Amino acid sequence: MNRKVYTSKDEFIKQNEELGTALPYSEDTSILRESVTVGGKTVPNRLACQAMEGCDGCFDGSPDELTFRRYKRLAEGGSGIIWFEATACREDGRANPRQLWIKKDNLDSFKKIVNDIREDSMKANGYAPLIIMQATHSGRYSKPHGTPEPLIAYNNPIFEGNNPIDKSRILSDDELDRIGEALIESSRLAEEAGFDGVDVKCCHRYINSELLSAYERDGKYGGSLENRTRLLRESIAGAMQITGSDFIVSSRLNVYDGFPHPYGFGVSKDGGTEFDSTEPTWLLSELSNMGVELLNITMGNPYFNPHVNRPFALGAYDPGEHPLEGVARMLHGIAALKKEVPEMKIISSALSYLGVVAPEVCAGFIKEGGFDFCGFGRTILAYPDYAKDILDCGKMKKEKICICCSKCSELMRSGWTPGCVVRDKLYTDLYREFKGGK
């Protein structure tokens, strides 16, 4: 069965029926042009650029030349939301030595890039996007000096196997308290830099996300659901208290990890790896009650089971399922949660594999109340002006789409600066250099 990204609707419709994935499809994509109000701010359309880390900042955490290049392309591309990439709250939480890191002494560089995004978008499109900064601590995947320096919530044999991380690397409750304080301070700095909001990152197995499955951890951050979500909830509450009423506080949230209890969140405690929405629904309801109006939902772990959060045509392993089934798990799972908290505005994920039919599938879901915004990740590296094409003609161009070949991830995992090897000559040349000139 074909696993290539869709370049025509006929192949999609055929496989959607054969696989029983039941993804809705609407030829009328005009709903994607609608503006939406979030936290008193108007988002000009329903298209969102997901947080795609460039690993191209300066060593002091400031945006560098390639960072500015990337966001200029996205700003001119027309998306209603730019979810600004993972930005560390502390040096020990950086995932690589060139990850962005916001602090007092480099704040002007963040002010500049936010201002440039708005100006570039206004010139190209006549409107400015909503800009949300993702505040992160990488935890298990911290590598601030280029080699692993993990800081974990608990030992996990699924990841560590016969080489468990030394228990001295398990963060104490006091240390987690201080990370929470750093996330709150990063939120204040994000507001000062001019961002419209902050994302207290809780996805893809970084520290906040790992705590969601700390079922067997002792202390105030483990065991009960209230404890396991404490760092997220208290960091969000603190960010709300320290920022203005018109500043949006949100999260990119993992609702399903894809591995069994007691090491995975969003699965049944009775065994198996099927999505169980019980605990995620409770968490979304709690966040809604706190005043969180916008959430960016995802699943899986890009280091362990990337087919769950970004279904691919070509990758390092065979996931044992068709990529469209991965897309369906994500989108139907998000739609089920949206049904439980209809008052929240929800951004979707895992759309790139859909290729040219992504706008029609998104329109179908939005019309059915499945989510509110369409979040594109890998696509924005290959096709930064995807939104402009959708807004102008209702469709995406097949010669510009991401082909989900995983080469951008290959670059990043090897410590290089990721970008689209297929569509962007700058990264084509970098990839050839990475491959020894081939």
Image (tube, rainbow, N blue to C red):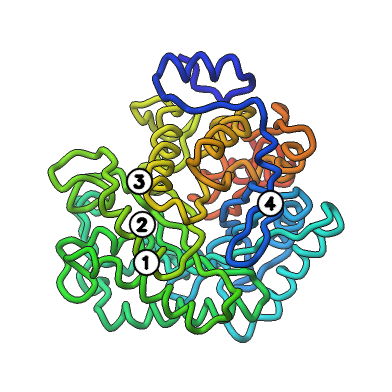
Q: Which residue position holds label 4?
A: 35
Query: Helix, strand or loop at disc 4?
Result: loop
Tag 3 or tag 4, which sits nearer the N-term? 4
Residue at far front of view: 343
Residue drawn at x 62%, y 41% as measured from the top left: 379
Q: Residues within 10 Å of mark 1 (few under 14, many from 20)?
A: many
- Examine the rendered structure and indicate whether residue 1 appears above or below residue 226: above
Query: Helix, strand or loop at disc 2?
Result: loop
Nearer to us of marks 3 and 2 is 2
- The tag on residue 304 is 3
**Residue 99 is at least partly visible in this image:** yes
Q: Splitting the image into 4 quarters, where does residue 41 fall? A: bottom right
Q: Is residue 302 left or right of residue 379?
A: left
Residue drawn at x 17%, y 53% as measured from the top left: 262
Nearer to us of marks 1 and 2 is 2
The quadrant the C terminus occupies is top right
Q: Which residue position holds label 1?
A: 139
Amino acid at dot 2: Arg
- State yes or no: discs 1 and 2 in contact (Cβ < 8 Å): yes
- State yes or no: discs 3 and 1 in contact (Cβ < 8 Å): no
Tag 4 or tag 1, which sits nearer the N-term? 4
**Residue 404 is at least partly visible in this image:** no
